[in-house]
Image (tube, grey):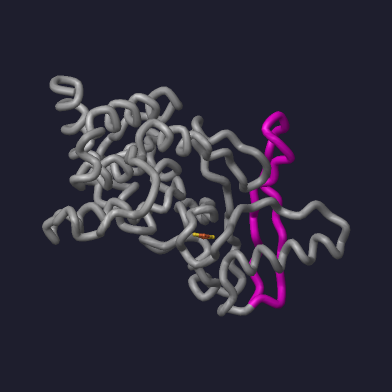
Amino acid sequence: MQVTFKIWRQPGPEFPGQFQEYPVQGLTEDMSFLEALDYLNETLVRQGEEVVAFEYDCREGICGQCGVYINGRAHGPHDHMTTCQLHLRSFQDGDTITVEPWRARAFPIIKDLVVDRSALDRIMQEGAYISAKTGTAPEANAILIPKEQSDTAMDAAACIGCGACVATCKNASASLFTAAKINHLNRLPQGKPEQHQRVKGMVDQMEAEGFGGCSFTGACEVECPEGISITNIAEMHNRYLRAKLFG
Ligand code: FES
């Protein structure tokens, strides 16, 4: 299989970037997308050229490190899939595949396909935790939680923080990410004591980082590898209002 990668190359944040085309032969349709980029990089090394910088860690759809824009869609052509889970069988022999970094003001570029997503970490630092004494883990069944409540909390907890919701949103909003992290904890009894502080802190930090507002277009829900529902955002707004009034 042969494809041409059209990849955004940018040596650093202070340098201009541009697309560069790389015809690659000898690929197979069973290769993952990241393996194909590895294959390209091995070729570049042999030729004495600078390799393409891109991020990954688990390559199992868990860590959220591997996001890039592929042919105009976050994580490529399929709904609810990470870049590392994408395979070349999703493309045709001879295709030109355009690969770009996440583009958002709050995600400044570092190099090539790598952007700085530490803004998401700073949102987490404002409340995505439960303050508890350290020591032996408490008995899991000491606090009984209705099944539906624990299920919806775990649905929100599935967010892997990849940033696809930001990259695909026309406002570069981090609302889906922030809502998932807030609702995960605020839906559980353990999260209740700090619920108002959590939602105010995280939403305010999201805005301070320069992410845009939610337009309820719904693109984030489609591209989210975990299929986090956009209804989380409405719930976050409701929680924020209540925290401002009663918190
Ligand atoms: S490398 Fe971990 S989710 Fe893709």
Q: Is residue 174 left or right of residue 148?
A: right
Toward the viewer: 77 or 211? 211
Q: Is residue 53 left or right of residue 179?
A: right
> Which residue sits at x=36%, y=39%?
128
Vertically, is 145 above or below 8? below
Toward the viewer: 210 or 6? 210
> Which residue sits at x=14%, y=61%?
147
| The C terminus - image quarter | top left
Could you tell me residue 76's position as x and y percent? 47, 59
Q: Is residue 21 shown in magenta?
A: yes
Residue 29, quarter of the rendered image: bottom right
> Which residue sits at x=57%, y=71%?
32
Start-end of magenta stretch:
1-27
Q: Tag count in the figure?
A: 0
Q: Residue furthest front?
A: 135
Toward the viewer: 57 or 166? 57
Q: Is residue 19 left or right of residue 137?
A: right
Could you tell me residue 175's position as x and y percent? 32, 37
Vertically, is 189 above or below 210? below
Toward the viewer: 155 or 88? 155
Vertically, is 11 above or below 85? above
Could you tell me residue 180's position as x and y percent? 30, 45
Q: Is residue 25 shown in magenta?
A: yes
| The N terminus - image quarter | bottom right
> Which residue sits at x=70%, y=55%?
21
Could you tell me residue 233's position as x and y percent? 24, 40
